[in-house]
Image: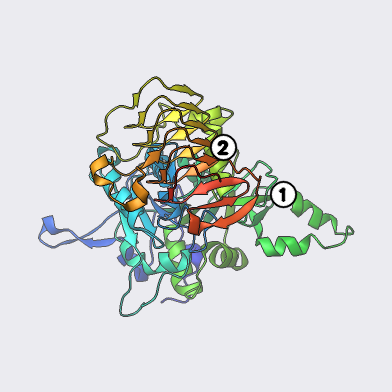
Amino acid sequence: MNPRISIKDLCYKPGSQLRLPKSFSSIFYTKNLQTNGSSTYLLPPANKCQSVAAIVFGDGSSHSKLYPLTKRRSEGAIPIAGNYRLIDAVVSNCINSNISKIYAITQFNSTSLNSHLSRAYSGTNLLKEGFVEVIAAYQTPEDKGWFQGTADSIRRCLWMLEEHPVLEYLVIPGYHLYKMDYQKLIDVHRSSNADITVSVLSKQRNEDLGFGIFALGSKNQVIEFKEDQELKASKSVSAEDSKEARDIARRSFPSMGIYVINRNTMIKLLRDYFPSANDLKSEVIRGAISLGLKVQAYLFDGYWEDMRSIEAYYRANMELVRRTNEAYNRFYDRDTPLYTLPRCLPPTLVNDAVIADSVIADGCILNRCKIKGTVVGVMTRVADEAVIEDSIIMGADAYQYQSCMGEEGMGIPVGIGEGSLIRKAIIDKNARIGKNVMIINKDNVEEANKEADGYIITGGIVVITRSAAISDGSII
């Protein structure tokens, strides 16, 4: 490695000629099989977003606050708004922003997520000449353990990421709900000649988001990053803080976990400067700031739900049915639609049911029931006289026939039984709710772990676990 080459030398600047040092020319070098093995250089396409590859992380961690929804699935695979998965919002943002090279890095409980991504986006015309490529956690003779974090997983996948000649990587979590035109983010990155651009929330949020805070200078250049524990410690400082400290506090914004990083900057940081770093934000990006690289901020002022808790997930679904803000429009925007797995399901069958302010997915069978303020997922069956209010019913993976019930679930079919009442609850997939069941949190409990009985309560919301069976006449 040439020690005289600085990381600044490796960063392409818009408007300049792309010239790489000899030691790095292999990055864009390949064999052209159609010219008898002669050598050629591949340059990124002219379209500004075609020269960007997205790296999507489909899961947060093994200690998700969305448990028990993440007991058998990763965060990105959680159903949302009846027909979709959380990761669909992020992949759709990429497609609608003309970013067609998408790598999805998965690890925890990734089976359903990997299956969804492969079935929904492989071979689709939406991506034209692009792809959605799933990179599941793997081991090699050199690396025999799990991915240890975002930085570690990208570093171990660089050999695959380097196959395509792009200028920047867009790094994004796959389990947040929002609509963003990534072209605007990339424009800010390039116009500011930044090495790294981080996306931050410009709107103040009352709750602790848990993603850390970026402090910005006068031209939105990042001057500092603080983790949550550092923020809590700083609150104990006396009121006699310096004016500079108070100014920094006023110019601090929550991180969204979304970054644009110049390709060569990423490679250099991960392999040379921070070869043992595990986390991209707290170690690598913070380290880039200390190295003097230009880290810019992009202020985002649109709707964004982080989905870091059961309460946040419930709130996002309820905002959809109440049509209170941009969340509703996100799913019905014809110019930037949300994509997902096409299903060959029949239309929903409604038999003398009363439905108000609700979202009903495909393939449901709703008999003489009442549904209000509820998201009803695919292939949900609701029996006569059932009442569902302010709830999320995730539905089923397949139709169930009476002859297939057997003894499993005490003979209770998948779906909502006759005369049952469900209020402010989340019913996970394939759950069996018997007849005359009341899921209403009758004792107004805030937190309870009754997983052995098929449910938990968190934030006052009752969550019936996947494939749980609630016997006839039960009161929760």
Q: Does 313 sit above or below residue 43?
A: above
Extreme residue in the bottom direction: 141
Mark 1 lies on residue: 251
Mark 2 lies on residue: 303
Extreme residue in the top direction: 352
Disc number placed over residue 446 in the picture, else none: none
Q: Residues within 10 Å of mark 2 (few under 14, many from 20)?
A: some
Identity, as a three-letter code, of the amino acid under mark 1: Arg
Left or right position of 257 against 236: left
Left or right position of 409 against 193: left
Q: Position of residue 241 (x, y in %)?
A: 86, 59
Q: Quadrant of residue 413?
A: top left
At a point 70% along the width and 64% down the height, the residue shown is 230
Q: Nearer the viewer, residue 476 or 180?
A: 476
Left or right position of 216 against 242: left
* Circle 2/circle 1 CB separation < 8 Å: no
Q: Position of residue 168 (x, y in %)?
A: 42, 53
Q: Nearer the viewer, residue 77 or 463?
A: 463
Q: Nearer the viewer, residue 251 or 460?
A: 460
Q: Quadrant of residue 114?
A: bottom left
